[in-house]
Every structure is written in C-alpha cells, then in structure tokens.
C-alpha cells in the first residue's frame, strides 16, 4: 500500500459544498475520506456518492449497533454504495457481526463489487474507567475488553477494528499482522491536541502497527490543508522506514 493510502481525512463538517471543496483539494494527497454522523445525517447517501464522484474512497463511520438483521441489511446498502469501509459496534454481538460480513460478501458477489472493509468499534475512547464500571457495567478492565472484542470481531470474520493509539500494540499481538487497525487520535508533532487526550504522532502510530490513520482537525482546520496532509504522509513514511 502506498504511504498516502494510509491517511483517512475526517470530513467533520455539515455543508455538502464545503465537504466537496476540501475533498477535491485533498484527493491527490490522501487515501480516503471519513463521513461520520454529522455529514451523513445532513446529506445521506448523496454525500457518499458525490465524494466518490471526485475519485475518492469513502469510510462511512456510522457505528451501527442494532439487531443482526438490521445491521446486515444496512451493510448490503453500503456495499451497493461501494463504500470503502464501514463500522459496527462489537457490543452488538458476535452474531450481528457474522451476519453482517456474510451479507456484505453475498451482496458484493451478486453485483460484482469489491466488499467494503468491515470494522468493529470496541470501547469508545470517550468512556472513562469509572464510567465503564458504573454506567456500562463492564467487569473486565477496558484494555482486556478491547482485546476480547477485537478477537471476537476477527472470529466473526470482520477485517479489523477502530482503536485508539494506545490499544494498537495489544490488538496487533492478539489478532496478527493482517488484521486492519484504523486509528484516530493522531496528532502531528507539535499540533494542537484539541479534545484528544492520549495521542500519538503519525510516525509513532504506524510504527506501533496502525494500518490507517484518521485525522480530522489538524488537516481540516489547517491554514493549508494540502500542506498539512503532505506533512502527515511524510511522517507516516518516516515512521515506516524506521520500523
Ligand atoms: O479532529 P480529530 O483528528 O480529532 O478527528 C478524529 C475523528 O475520528 C473524528 O471524526 C472523531 O469522531 C473520530 N474518532 C475519534 N476517537 C475515537 C473514534 C473516532 O476521534 N475513539
């Protein structure tokens, strides 16, 4: 994979025009764009199609958590939309994940399409240890639960997980080299942390074993987003070279 393919830019805006404008500029320099709840809620599948028409791959980040049939059917729709990747909550259960992957592959075969990469979301990084115990009722510690769910996702046939930088090592060890790890919470050396707490630089994240990096504000809010993207890809390249 080319170094720049590892960079996924989070299009966290709600204007379709703004999303297209930034995608058009960044497309030659990055691997894909992430469309999350904000943009998808505002514009639906149309925004996915319009970004794809610019020649870009799209990660649909809607974190499905519902009964197996419902998520599997949504997975079929995303397959027909030629989504590059999408995600479901591991907390939705093994059977939900299994049926979703099965449906995605069946749908892709039927239409002669490439199946999307299906990822599991494990424990949201916004959940503290205290909340995990008191509100969610988690009995294992968060790191143990993350690895447990990553293994479960792999057994259910998913391609990988979305994980914070500090979880990459344990997941790589548990799930092997071919498992896809998509990592947000990445900040170039010297960048503003915003609300992200435990961050890694792009170089550190790929060295730790991340397959793809999701970066939002350090690119979207940069005075020169193209330059910011190129610099991140340079950091990725340097990180991989020193591996
Ligand atoms: O702007 P920033 O680089 O922090 O954006 C990161 C993107 O990754 C956002 O779209 C955010 O919703 C997403 N994300 C995250 N942390 C997670 C999961 C997803 O920041 N644990």
Image (cartoon, helix red, strand yellow):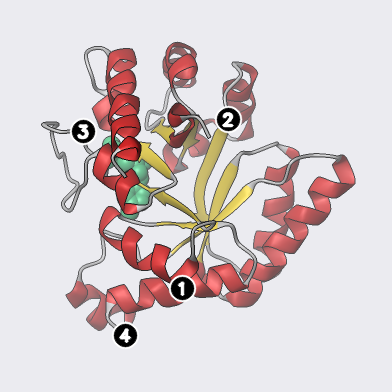
Could you tell me which secondary element the residue under label 4 belongs to?
A: loop
Residue at the right extreme, as displayed: 110
Task: Give residue 241's quadrant in the image.
Answer: top left
**Which type of secondary structure does the marked residue at label 2 adopt?**
loop
Task: Say which residue label 3 marks.
Answer: 188
- The circle drawn on residue 215 is none
Q: Secondary structure at mark 1?
A: helix
Rendered location of residue 49, percent (x, y): 64, 26
Circles 1 and 3: CB distance less than 8 Å? no
Task: Indicate the position of residue 176 as horizontal and vertical percent values.
Answer: 49, 64
**Residue appearing at x 37%, y 57% in the figure:** 163
Q: Decide: few, some or many residues near mark 3? Use Cα within 10 Å; few <14, some 14-19, many ≥20.
A: many
Q: Residue at x 33, y 78 (%)?
A: 144
Tag of residue 149 = 1
Query: Distance between the Cα atoms at labels 4 and 2?
Result: 36 Å
Above or below 188: residue 139: below
Q: Please say whether residue 127 is visible from this viewpoint.
A: yes
Q: Is mark 3 within 8 Å of ligand 1?
A: no
Is label 2 in contact with label 1 (beta carbons under 8 Å)?
A: no
Task: Name the mark nearer the viewer: 3 or 2.
Answer: 3
Mark 3 or 4: in front is: 3
Mark number displayed over residue 57: 2
Residue 207 spot, x, y in % from top left: 31, 47
Instruction: Give the alpha-carbon distance from disc 1 to disc 3, as whole Å.
Output: 29 Å
**First along the sequence among labels 1 and 3:** 1
Q: Which mark is residue 140?
A: 4
Residue behind label 2 places its C-beta within 8 angstroms of ligand 1: no
Q: Which sits in the foreground, 150 or 10?
A: 150
| Quadrant position of the C terminus in the picture | top left
**In terms of image quadrants, where is residue 166?**
bottom left
């Amino acid at each position: 994979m080319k170094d720049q393919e590892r960079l996924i830019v989070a299009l966290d805006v709600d204007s379709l025009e703004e999303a297209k404008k930034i995608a058009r500029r960044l497309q030659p320099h990055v691997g894909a764009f992430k469309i999350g709840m904000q943009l998808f809620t505002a514009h639906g599948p149309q925004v996915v199609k319009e970004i794809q028409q610019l020649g870009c791959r799209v990660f649909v980040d809607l974190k499905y958590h519902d009964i197996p049939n419902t998520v599997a059917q949504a997975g079929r729709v995303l397959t027909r939309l030629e989504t590059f990747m999408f995600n479901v909550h591991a907390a939705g259960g093994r059977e939900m994940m299994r049926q979703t992957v099965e449906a995605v592959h069946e749908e892709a075969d039927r239409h002669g399409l490439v199946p999307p990469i299906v990822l599991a979301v494990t424990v949201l990084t916004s959940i503290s240890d205290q909340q995990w115990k008191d509100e969610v009722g988690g009995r294992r510690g968060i790191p143990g639960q993350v690895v447990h769910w990553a293994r479960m996702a792999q057994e259910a046939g998913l391609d990988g997980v979305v994980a914070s930088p500090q979880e990459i090592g344990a997941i790589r060890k548990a799930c092997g080299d071919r498992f896809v790890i998509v990592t947000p919470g990445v900040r170039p050396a010297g960048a503003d942390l915003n609300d992200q707490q435990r961050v890694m630089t792009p170089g550190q994240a790929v060295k730790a074993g991340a397959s793809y990096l999701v970066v939002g504000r350090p690119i979207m809010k940069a005075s020169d987003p193209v330059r910011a993207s190129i610099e991140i890809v340079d950091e990725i390249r340097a990180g991989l070279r020193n591996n």
